[in-house]
Amino acid sequence: ETYADKVQRNQAYKKLDEGDLAYFQSILEPNQIISNNEDDLAFYNEDWMRKYRGQSKLLLKPKTTEQVSEILKYCNSNKLAVVPQGGNTGLVGGSIPVFDEIILSLSSLNKIRSFDNVSGIFKCDAGVILETADQYLAEQGYIFPLDLGAKGSCHVGGVVATNAGGLRLIRYGSLHGTVLGLEVVLADGTIVNSLDSLRKDNTGYDLKQLFIGSEGSLGVITGVSILCPARPQAVNVAVLAVDSYESVQKVFNDARKELSEILSAFEFMDETSQILVSKYLKLDHPIESDSYPFYILIETSGSNKEHDDEKLETFLGNAMENGIVLDGIIAQDETQLRSLWNWRENIPEASQMQGGVYKYDVSIPLKDLYGLVEAANEKLEAAGLVDFEDISKPVVKAVGYGHIGDGNLHLNVAVRKYSKEVEKVLEPFVYEWIQSKKGSISAEHGLGFQKKNYIQYSKSPVEIALIKDIKHHYDPNGILNPYKYV
Ligand code: FAD
């Protein structure tokens, strides 16, 4: 997608010159700089969906917080725009440049700082990969309190910057609760060190909260302190089939009551999402006998396998006996457990394999949640743009899945190519529909570039004015992640 018709380069930002490059070469090693090499910069200039592409000519990889500070101080004094980048797995076009912003990659700031195995408090650099953090914690008998499909690439700092929700929010809560402290470098280079290990600290404003979910617009997160729970001893996963969205809700309600303290994930997936994953993985669905309109993935995590097995089996037995659940499978070992999760975690990749995907990550009151997928398909059909088989149509289908436990739907419109025609049918229609149900246009992916012009569907003018005031206060020259967020 080109940006030209959506936004103009702000000429107040300086264009990079030889003098700037010489400065960065004076403070960083050669292997911490990529400049002017289009091929080497390609990955960092393009987003995960291959939907947005910037034209940065310079990528910097600081190894220390002090280097981040020196870089930002220089950029702020010289009005050089900067885009902080983690694992570049964000899904709203926030992590890549729009024009020629300098990419500040946190990937070399990647050390684990400390772990306290009594309190469960883990501290690390922002650039530690989420899966690396979780594997380290697993060795100590602990778990990172957040998990998501991009864990092999996304950074701890990146998930904090986006306030990612993920697959276990239902169990461990949001990062606003588990993050205890942050180290952040402000736009002018000031280092704010509040890497606290305290669970309670009511002295003044809780400043770290502002940076959680600020998407690189207020400061660069360089360190994170987070409270981690003990790793569950017994984990079970089941995939169930039901015949309607009403049944998905009914099973959720029952699961909360009957599995209560051991329920750690409750995800739903519609039929088309599973057909796409089946094509992508080249595998038959684990519930082979037939195709069902909806599937549910339930995970339990507890401390006593016998107790948990019995609870889950009784729950499923009851649900099948009373006819709500039509079919189901419980993982018998770790390999099967992983493979059942694959049917949920591969939906993002599977939905874009035909060419691309328009992604809407939204919160909607539960009873209306799936209505958005139906409404989107109706709208696309009325415009004659959708057909699952016919490759002359730009849209394959709109699919729905997500974190039912959090009221969070992922609407993925799988397309054969990105086109203005499709985008015009979807936007602002999708946002208006969400607003009419009093939902949020961004549940967990953030605003980035994609949703910045639609913030008013979820925030009032007074709130938007306050957000702009805060941005101006922390970044008066607007050098941090411009053209996005607000
Ligand atoms: P990036 O993509 O590099 O950056 C994201 C934003 O944060 C950008 O605006 C960037 O400027 C900023 N940023 C990054 N690092 C820093 C930093 N250190 N300091 C300041 N700003 C920074 N999200 C969910 O919430 N739940 C999910 O279940 C989920 N599943 C996903 C599954 C897949 C397969 C993929 C590809 C993505 C998924 N996401 C999900 C999207 C999610 O936002 C990202 O995966 C993750 O949170 C971003 O981390 P990152 O390190 O890749 O950040």
Image (spheres, rainbow, N blue to C red):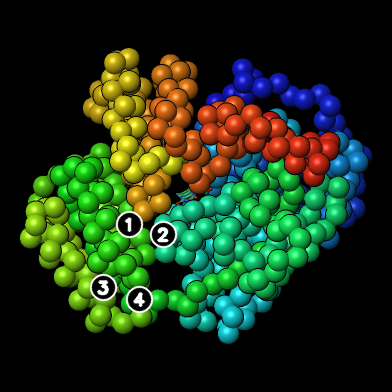
> Is 118 left or right of 439, judged from the image as shown?
right
Q: Quadrant of the C terminus?
A: top right
Residue at mark 4 to residue at mark 1: CA–CA distance: 15 Å
Q: Earlier in the sequence, mark 4 or mark 1?
A: 1
Residue at mark 1 to residue at mark 3: CA–CA distance: 19 Å
Provide residue 221's location: percent of width, then percent of height. Answer: 71, 55
Q: Amino acid at mark 2?
A: Ile
Query: Residue 302 has which mark?
Result: 4
**Could you say whether the residue bearing mark 4 is in a helix, strand or loop?**
strand
> Is 471 left or right of 371, judged from the image as shown?
right
Find residue 380 and report its image quarter: top left
**Could you say whether the residue bearing mark 1 is in a helix, strand or loop?**
strand
Q: Amino acid at mark 1?
A: Phe
Q: Earlier in the sequence, mark 4 or mark 2?
A: 2
Query: Residue 266 has which mark?
Result: 1
Provide residue 307's location: percent of width, then percent of height. Answer: 25, 80
Residue at mark 2 to residue at mark 3: CA–CA distance: 24 Å
Provide residue 361's location: percent of width, then percent of height. Answer: 45, 40
The crowd level at tag 1 (other Cα within 10 Å; few <14, some 14-19, many 20+) is many
**Residue at image point 82% right, 30% down:** 13
- Residue of label 2: 170
**Residue at image point 68% right, 51% down:** 210
**CB within 8 Å, label 2 to label 3:** no
Q: Amino acid at mark 3?
A: Asp
Residue at mark 4 to residue at mark 2: CA–CA distance: 14 Å
**CB within 8 Å, label 1 to label 3:** no
Is residue 358 placed above or below 304 in the rendered structure?
A: above
